[in-house]
Image (tube, grey):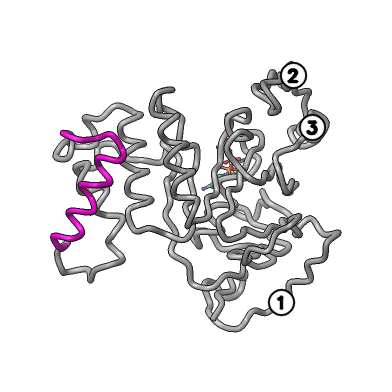
Amino acid sequence: MEEVRKPDNKQTTGAPQTTDGTSPSSPLFRKGGEDEVLIKIRDLSAGYDGRLVLRNVNLNVYERDFLGIIGPNGGGKTTLIKCILGLLKPSGGEIICRPLTMGYLPQYSSIDRKFPITVEEVILSGLSSKKSLTSRFTSEHREKALSVIARMGLEGMEKRAIGALSGGQLQRALLGRAIISDPEVVILDEPSTYIDKRFEARLYELLAEINKDCAIILVSHDIGTVLQQVKSIACVNETLDYHPDTGITEEWLERNFNCPIELLGHGTLPHRILGEHKH
Ligand SMILES: Nc1ncnc2c1ncn2[C@@H]1O[C@H](COP(=O)(O)OP(=O)(O)OP(=O)(O)O)[C@@H](O)[C@H]1O
């Protein structure tokens, strides 16, 4: 049973209402891709208060994909994620998927740090869908939370309120919440904003590990780092331009960012970008 999210049938489940139509010449086709398509996005448009910020977006997210989403500020990356998560109703087009478990790490700026909740409670809250509203977390849930706390390098901080964490520690706690349920898709919106270089290396090791069984969608401004981690890349700037691998060119970036971008070589992969633009 697939779920179809359309403007006029929010979160309706039922048979898919469109055929895939993907062909080898289509941007939706991934070279050598025999993996199942987990999420199909077709001609999606979305926005706020009648103003469209996304138009005609087409994208497939595959099983075990590691999709990087890049793009200029305000280009619509978070809006696309909100649509995928079912938090924002599309204005047009549709998102088709079977019921999937998704873990989500929101953008840091959207977190209320004054909310009175501890590290352990934040991480456990990622298992809320595994129990009824009124029942308590089981000892197994708590053991799982402890192992995630260790994986996130937050040992000893279990009972600390999130308001007393550094930015990087809070992002690690939120990442723990996103992965504790072993979801089929993990969506990370700017996960390394406050994370230091030492944990960033661990973060990407961890993502490579969970990517063995789980698709990852990673939104980031750090194009150089993203290109070294992901399998495919999409640039969102009102529309979406998909690249089935990471072999992108400066021209591709410039076209999508609408400004000059310089890639510095580092091994075989672009390492850093410099924007010499006026806006
Ligand atoms: N809740 C909202 N209500 C009205 N407009 C919004 C809302 N959220 C985002 N927008 C607007 O929609 C556009 C796209 O925003 P979005 O957050 O999706 O961009 P983004 O690519 O994630 O940006 P950034 O790189 O700065 O995080 C922006 O112009 C933004 O101001």
Question: Where residue 266 sits in the image (x, y, percent)?
Answer: 67, 21
Q: Is 157 positioned to the left or the right of 277 in the image?
A: left
Question: Where residue 217 sits in the image (x, y, percent)?
Answer: 55, 49
Asked which secondary structure carries label 3, the reply is loop
Quarter that holds the C terminus: top right
The residue carrying mark 3 has its beta carbon less than 8 Å from ligand 1: no
Q: Is residue 86 above or below residue 220?
A: below
Which of label 2 and label 3 is nearer to you?
Answer: 3
Magenta segment boundaries in residue numbering: 138-156
* Whole-number angstrom distance, CA of label 2 to CA of label 3: 18 Å
Asked which secondary structure carries label 1, the reply is loop
Magenta portion: prevailing SS class: helix
Question: Where residue 37 sits in the image (x, y, percent)?
Answer: 63, 65
Which residue has dot 1 on it?
A: 18
Q: Residue 249 carries which label?
A: 3
Earlier-in-chain disc, 3 versus 1: 1
